[in-house]
Image: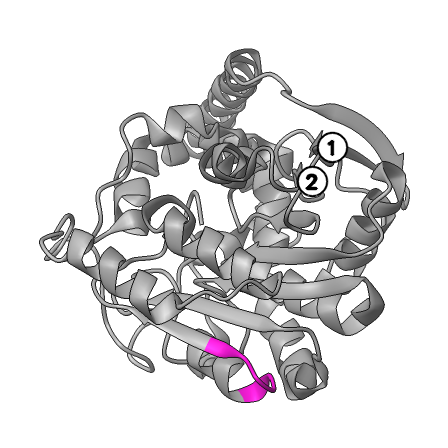
Amino acid sequence: MNLLYALICFLAALLLALAGVTRVGAWLIERRNPPVGTFATVNATRMHFVHAEEPKGADLPPVVFIHGASGNLKDQMLPFRKHLAGRAEMLFFDRPGHGWSGRGSANEDPHGQAKTIAALMDHVGIDRAIVVGHSFGGAIAATFALDFPDRTAGVLFLAPASHPWPGGATSWYYTLTTTPVIGPLFSETLSYPGGVLRLGAATDCVFSPNKAPDDYARDASISLVLRPAAFRANATDVEGLYRHAVATAPRYGEIAAPTVVISGDRDTVVYEEIHSAGLGRDIPGAELIWVHNLGHKPEWIATDLAVAAIEKLAGKPTDLQAVAKQVEARLSGDSYGVGICVDESAPHRSPELKPGE
């Protein structure tokens, strides 16, 4: 009995210590990564966003950017804003529960998040826009195009996650985090120290076989996802993706907006042969651009191609295949993470949505 009591006391003390470490870690993360935008409450959600107003002489329609799992608005703003400055009105935002945005009460699935995005567009005065969605953001972009067709001028999918995949499994820590009782305990004690240990390697694998930009995780504030509430919101999103895809993918044929899908054939995060190929097949008139030796981060590694796709969606004559060939030539020698990061084809692996996707 004394031994059992001592063990219980030890475990309780360990959990309290880990909770303390997590709280201090979360405070440090927020101190080092303060908000960079503006706040507004829309659809009962406190949203953090950056709105680049329409410039004089803009030659492109407004563009709305939707980041993926584990990310925040910087993941799209850093690569795109400088390339589109002076050309288009832009809206970047932390998805509900991510970055500095609150989770709200109506954002537990992509339909709710699409509604919040539409409300945020109303707030900043954007009526209709080209919607750009990366990874998990692709599922929301597709949902937005279905739920708000009159507000969708075009859709650009970047390494999207959009369709049901064999088994529907995700990473174990997402499943654990969404488990009642155990999940909140895990996120309040182990998600921060475990995430800190894995952040560098996970980021490298998200970019593999391409090289992550120097200081990417720091500059893009990826560590914000390691705070307990953000970690739980991210896990809820990812765990619910399969169910959403099962219900929504059969409707993709209803998307009428001009569509471009950009995908690498060396994506180690999602099944490109299911998601990207599926969107290219299911959306009428969609143009699917495959890029050899490109991983999961086309917005960072092939920004020129993504900008060219935005131009084409805006009606400009653009040869995307020619631009893709230029990107392939640039990436031909990339082999970062090869042999370390998993790169298998469906249905033999479970997709893991990792930091910065």
Kindly identify the amino acid type of the residue bearing the numbered disc 2: Glu
In this view of the protein, which residue sits in the foreground, 277 or 180?
A: 277
Residue 95: x, y in percent? 67, 44
- Compared with 16, 289 (above or below) is below
Dot 1, crowdedness within 10 Å: few (<14), some or many (≥20)?
some
* Disc 2 secondary structure class: loop
Cβ–Cβ below 8 Å for labels 1 and 2?
yes
Q: Is residue 124 magenta?
A: no
In this view of the protein, which residue sits in the foreground, 194 or 352?
A: 352
Which numbered disc, 1 or 2, marks the residue that appears first in the sequence? 1
How far apart are labels 1 and 2 at the CA level? Answer: 5 Å
Q: Which color scheme does this rendered protein use?
A: one colour
Write the residue at 50% across / 27% down.
15
Write the residue at 16% across / 58% down.
329
* Disc 1 secondary structure class: loop
Kindly identify the amino acid type of the residue bearing the numbered disc 1: Glu
Residue ID for mark 1: 53
Q: Tell me if residue 267 can be seen.
A: no
Residue 316: x, y in percent? 55, 62
In this view of the protein, which residue sits in the foreground, 319 or 200?
A: 319
- Compared with 266, 194 (above or below) is above
For the stretch drawn in magenta, what is the main secondary structure?
A: loop
Residue ID for mark 2: 89
Residue 297: x, y in percent? 37, 51
Write the residue at 50% across / 13% down.
32
> What span is in magenta?
282-287
Residue 103: x, y in percent? 75, 41
- Compared with 245, 66 (above or below) is above
Q: Tell me if residue 300 can be seen.
A: yes
